Amino acid sequence: MKEITVEELKQKIDNGEEFQLIDVREPFEYEVSNLGGENIPLAGVLIESDKIATDKPVIVQCRSGKRSAAAIMQLEQQLGYDNLYNLEGGILAWKEKFDPSMPVY
């Protein structure tokens, strides 16, 4: 599984690179704090796969990186995606590195 660090994600954002960010946490988690990605909870990731790009890099994130890894495994194994990157450490790593005041449960 391909992974990306929060530092690499921030660089992509700062450089204005084209990619899609998918947050696979539950809506209530997304409301507490998010990085501006599209919220598609893990349970619905296959059902809503038509919302996930196939023509550009897609970074998948959750709280710590575990659910996003599970989402990527489903999408790669069942639908053949090959453009997915797991955000190492998830939003917890982003908070630690860039935004200590970010509310995360």
Image (cartoon, rainbow, N blue to C red):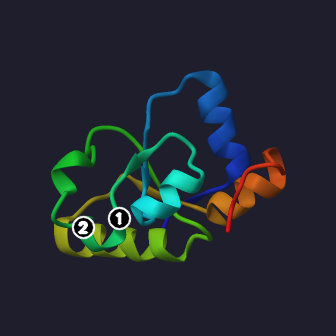
- Looking at the image, can residue 88 be seen? no
**Residue beneath the point at 25% across and 75% down:** 77
Label 2, label 1: how far apart the Cα atoms are? 6 Å
* Disc 1 secondary structure class: loop
**Quarter where residue 57 is shown:** top left
Q: Amino acid at mark 2?
A: Gly
Q: Amino acid at mark 1?
A: Pro
Give the residue furthest to the top: 16
**Quarter where residue 10 is shown:** top right
Position of residue 45 relative to residue 10, above or below, is: below
x, y (%) of residue 1?
47, 70
The image quadrant where one finds the C terminus is bottom right
x, y (%) of residue 95?
76, 54
Which dot marks residue 44? 2
In this rendering, position of residue 3 left or right of residue 100 = left
Which of the pair 24/8 is nearer the observer? 24
x, y (%) of residue 5?
67, 55
* Disc 2 secondary structure class: helix
**Residue beneath the point at 60% across and 31% down:** 13
**Quarter where residue 16 is shown:** top right
The residue beneath circle 1 is 41
